[in-house]
Amino acid sequence: MTERHVPRVIALVDQRSAGLPIPTAAFAAETRITADGLLTDQRTRPLRDLRISVTDRCNFRCSYCMPKEVFNKDHLYLPHSALLSFEEITRIAKVFVAHGVQKIRLTGGEPLLRKNIESLIAQLAQLRTPQGHALDLTLTTNGSLLARKAHALKAAGLQRVTVSLDGLDDAVFRSMNDVDFPVADVLAGIEAAREAGLGPIKVNMVVKRGTNENQILPMARHFRGSGMVLRFIEYMDVGASNGWRMDDVLPSSEIVKRIHAELPLVQLDPSNVGETAERWGYANAAGQHDKTLGEIGVISSVTQAFCGDCNRARLSTEGQLYLCLFASQGYDLRSLVRDPVQQADLESVIGHIWRGRNDNYSESRSTQSGDSAPAQRRVEMSYIGG
């Protein structure tokens, strides 16, 4: 299926060095915050989920994330010295866990491109919540390296994976990744992850109208009854490089309608507070959820705001803390973690940053119409992960 219009690609604005000021109250003895696992923001949202980007590089050039026109051979990636080391990541993650984080997801770019990623996973797998529980440790990947790494990832302590797959038709998929990568190799990676016990596996499909919407039903048929959860994600206005426009968005309600017409669905309750995906189970003849057939999820990142119970923070590859996927600036934690004196302030700094959080971008942008959005530059998805 071909595009209905020529993509509008906007030049990338490099905001990686721009940072918000660290709250000065974090350093004063009388206003220090110590971790008790009960931290909430101004909207009483707790801190439960930390997304960590381990690289700004990817071997795919998907148009909605790292379009080839922008991320070409002349694009300057972060030097290795700018990246957080595995020990620095673990040190920061330990503080987040003390503040209440129960789930850590490793992202990119493509996280499996980070050399010796298994070493980081092994370090994070040793962390425990204040109650003594292991973390929910997961990773999102495009699947290109998964077949060769799945067993090592499991052995290191990774619990499960989410694999991005935007279609089953090989021509459509090669067009979407824009590097001519075959869909068969991603499917092989998914199978390797299943055999290694990295489950339950989630499969994410970004749906872009006029590009891969004809893959919705083939994907639903393929993963129905597989034990894997297929999730459809609305094409998002993240960053400025993908030429996003509202006309490219296929609302999740339409996705559910198309699947339900052939494969009847029944809506399910959320699995967790703060869950971004709306759950739909495949129904039996009596109209009840048949657990053997599994379920799908839809993430309505554009048409339905889910800011109200968002409990996620994002740590960039170079240690910038972002409080929203659609943020324009982050807080520089790298300078703190690399300063022997200020390392001790990290707990209070994170506490003050989260306590001051009041963002609700999706709710705000949902009041806009057409291609309009708040007039701010947003950080690229490839930089802080999805």
Image (tube, rainbow, N blue to C red):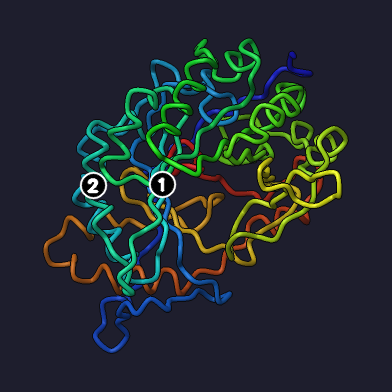
Mark 1 or mark 2, earlier in chain: 2
Residue 328 pos. (x, y %): 51, 50
Q: Secondary structure at mark 2?
A: helix
Q: Residue at x 76, y 43 (%)?
A: 252
Q: Amino acid at mark 1?
A: Thr
Q: Amino acid at mark 2?
A: Ala
Q: Are marks 1 and 2 in contact (CB under 8 Å)?
A: no
Identify residue for label 2. 122
Residue depicted at x 27% and y 37%: 117
Q: Is residue 351 left or right of residue 177?
A: left
From the viewer's side, name the closer residue of 337 and 138: 138
Identity of the residue drawn at 54% across and 72% down: 45
User: Residue 17: x percent and y percent?
Assistant: 35, 45
Q: Which residue is mark 1?
A: 138
Q: Quadrant of the N terminus?
A: top right
All told, the count of numbered labels is 2
Relative to 65, does residue 28 appear above or below in the rendering? below
User: Can you say whether 298 is above or below 5 in the image?
Assistant: below
Expressed as whole percent of the image width and height from the top left, the position of residue 169 reads 65, 15
